[in-house]
Amino acid sequence: MQQILSFLPACLWGFFACLAFGLVFNIHGWGIVICGFGGALGWFVYQAVQHMAHNDIIAAFLSAVVIAVYSELMARIRRCPVTGYLQIALLPLVPGAGIYYAMRYCVAGENELFLSTLLHTFGFAASLAVGAMLASTIMRSLLPRFYHRH
């Protein structure tokens, strides 16, 4: 329980970062708060899975899946496009540090560190993309079936 509580400050920062990007992306009303909760939820899942599995690529994949499911549900509830919720909620997970360090190693001529960092960053970004795409595809195929039953 203590470990879970230690995740909360970073989740709070993810929430506020997504609020700010919601303003930049011109999200209106409660949509900004929904984007913030999506970013905080994604960051919480990322930290929890990383703590349990000690693998950041798996953590990124699972957090992208959770963010995509959350974004699809919120978009259906609010009858808004899902892309705004999904893109903004994924922003705290973008591997900016990996890109920075890969370029730093490249400029410094440290080829081995450059290649390993670059490949890890590509794997991280690909896991985000595949997780979001897989979950969105499954949700879009399942949700219309729930609407027809009622």
Image (cartoon, rainbow, N blue to C red):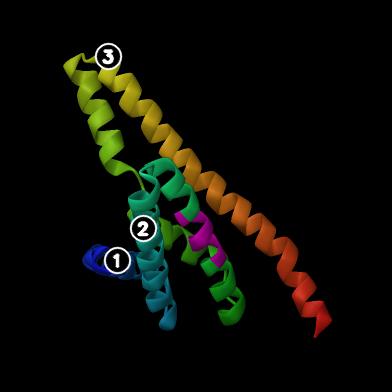
Q: Closer to the camera: disc 3 or disc 1?
A: 1
From the viewer's side, name the closer residue of 70 and 107. Answer: 70
Quick one: label 2 or label 1, which is nearer the N terminus? 1
At horizontal 36% and vertical 71% (from top left) the residue drawn is: 36
Residue at x 42% of width, y 68% of height: 38
The secondary structure type at the circle numbered 1 is helix
User: Compared to 37, does 47 lie above or below?
Assistant: above
Disc 1: which residue: 4
Q: Residue furthest bottom?
A: 150
Quadrant into which the N terminus falls: bottom left
In the displayed structure image, the side of residue 28 where residue 148 appears, left or right = right
Q: Position of residue 83 (x, y in %)?
A: 53, 61
Q: Which residue is mark 2?
A: 48
| Frontmost residue, 69 versus 90 | 69
Residue 43, image x, y percentages: 35, 60
Q: Residue at x 53, y 56 (%)?
A: 65
Looking at numbered disc 3 in the image, what kind of residue is underneath it? Asn
Residue 36, relative to residue 98: is it above or below?
below
Q: Which residue is mark 3?
A: 111
Mark 3 touching mark 2, by CB under 8 A? no
Q: Is residue 55 magenta?
A: no
Question: What amino acid is found at the position of numbered circle 2 in the picture?
Answer: Ala
Dot 2 crowding, Cα within 10 Å, few <14, some 14–19, many 20+? some
Q: Main secondary structure of the magenta part?
A: helix
Q: In the displayed orientation, state which residue is furthest to the front.
A: 1
Residue numbers of the magenta segment: 63-69
Q: Is label 3 in contact with label 1 (beta carbons under 8 Å)?
A: no
At horizontal 26% and vertical 27% (from top left) the residue drawn is: 103
Position in image of residue 85 (x %, y %): 48, 66
Coordinates of residue 82 in the picture (x, y in percent): 56, 66
In whole angstroms, how far apart are the C-alphas of marks 3 and 2? 33 Å
